[in-house]
């Protein structure tokens, strides 16, 4: 799959995320998955693990963030992009903000539970304005990327779940042609001025020593979670 392509595109990574979500459905999980990449190279990948681990906190995005921090041996993921086939919920979005992921790409929008559609956690500047030592500015956001394919995958892999979510308005009707072009969909990138660059350096090298274990994680070889 992507393992032969060290610099995968947004389309490659999102479609790989779709394949992982189908795997989750086959394992009896909700059809959700997440991939964390840096410079087009996968750092961590996982399916939803709530049913497997009997733990409601084991959302795919949360597991992927933990695996990425282990793989990179750092708690700051500002150079990374996270891909999710479903819009991350409020819980996951808060973790995305605290881990400082620089870019978020998701496919199917969730008006009822989404951490940007319903609660604008991903775009909330109050966090970074009030606590710049902990929170970076909001990540660049690509919404409804390949959403027609993402919706079709949900319907194919988990038809009963898909029908229930669609009937309850838990997933949005795909907008035809939405976010097809990743260059157009990319949104504002995080361009650092001198003050922002200095704050980033202080976060990583000074402030992260308090309450984050120095920002470093023990070395591991784990990249993925079955």
Image (cartoon, helix red, strand yellow):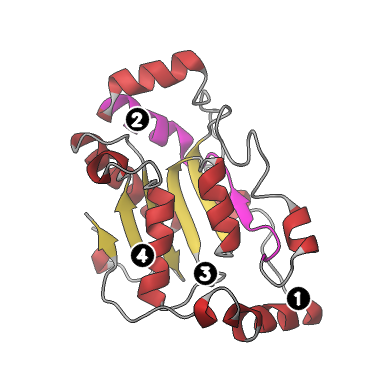
- Residue sticking out furthest to the left: 27
Q: Position of residue 120 (x, y in %)?
A: 68, 42
Instruction: Work out how far the residue at label 3 is from the one at label 1, CA to CA, in angstroms.
Output: 16 Å
Q: Which residues are magenta?
A: 135-156
Quadrant hosting residue 97: bottom right
Dot in front, 2 or 3 = 3
Q: Is residue 179 left or right of residue 55?
A: right
Counting residues from the start of the chain, the first of labels 4 and 1 encountered is 4
- The residue under label 2 is 154
- The residue under label 3 is 77
- The residue under label 1 is 196
- The residue under label 4 is 67
Is 140 drawn above or below residue 215 in the view shown?
Answer: above
* Quadrant including the C terminus: bottom left
Instruction: Work out how far the residue at label 2 is from the one at label 4, CA to CA, in angstroms.
Output: 25 Å
Mark 3 neighbour class, 10 Å CA radius: few under 14, some 14 to 19, many 20 or more: many
Identify which residue is drawn at 73% across, 57% down. Answer: 127
């Amino acid at each position: 799959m992507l393992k032969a392509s060290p610099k995968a595109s947004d389309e490659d990574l999102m479609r790989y995320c779709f394949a992982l979500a189908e795997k989750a459905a086959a394992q009896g999980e909700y059809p959700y998955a997440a991939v964390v990449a840096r410079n087009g190279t996968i750092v961590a990948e996982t399916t939803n693990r709530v049913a497997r681990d009997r733990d409601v906190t084991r959302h795919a995005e949360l597991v992927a963030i933990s695996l990425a921090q282990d793989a990179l041996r750092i708690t700051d993921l500002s150079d990374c992009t996270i891909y999710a086939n479903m819009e991350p919920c409020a819980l996951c979005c808060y973790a995305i903000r605290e881990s400082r992921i620089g870019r978020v790409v998701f496919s199917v929008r969730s008006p009822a539970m989404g951490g940007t559609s319903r609660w604008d956690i991903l775009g909330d500047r109050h966090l970074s304005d009030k606590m710049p030592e902990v929170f970076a500015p909001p990540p660049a956001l690509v919404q409804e990327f390949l959403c027609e394919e993402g919706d079709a995958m949900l319907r194919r892999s988990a038809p009963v779940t898909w029908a229930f979510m669609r009937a309850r308005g838990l997933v949005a009707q795909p907008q035809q042609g939405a976010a097809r072009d990743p260059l157009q969909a990319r949104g504002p990138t995080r361009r650092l001025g001198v003050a922002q660059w200095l704050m980033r350096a202080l976060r990583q090298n000074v402030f992260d020593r308090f309450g984050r274990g120095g920002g470093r994680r023990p070395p591991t070889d784990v990249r993925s979670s079955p």
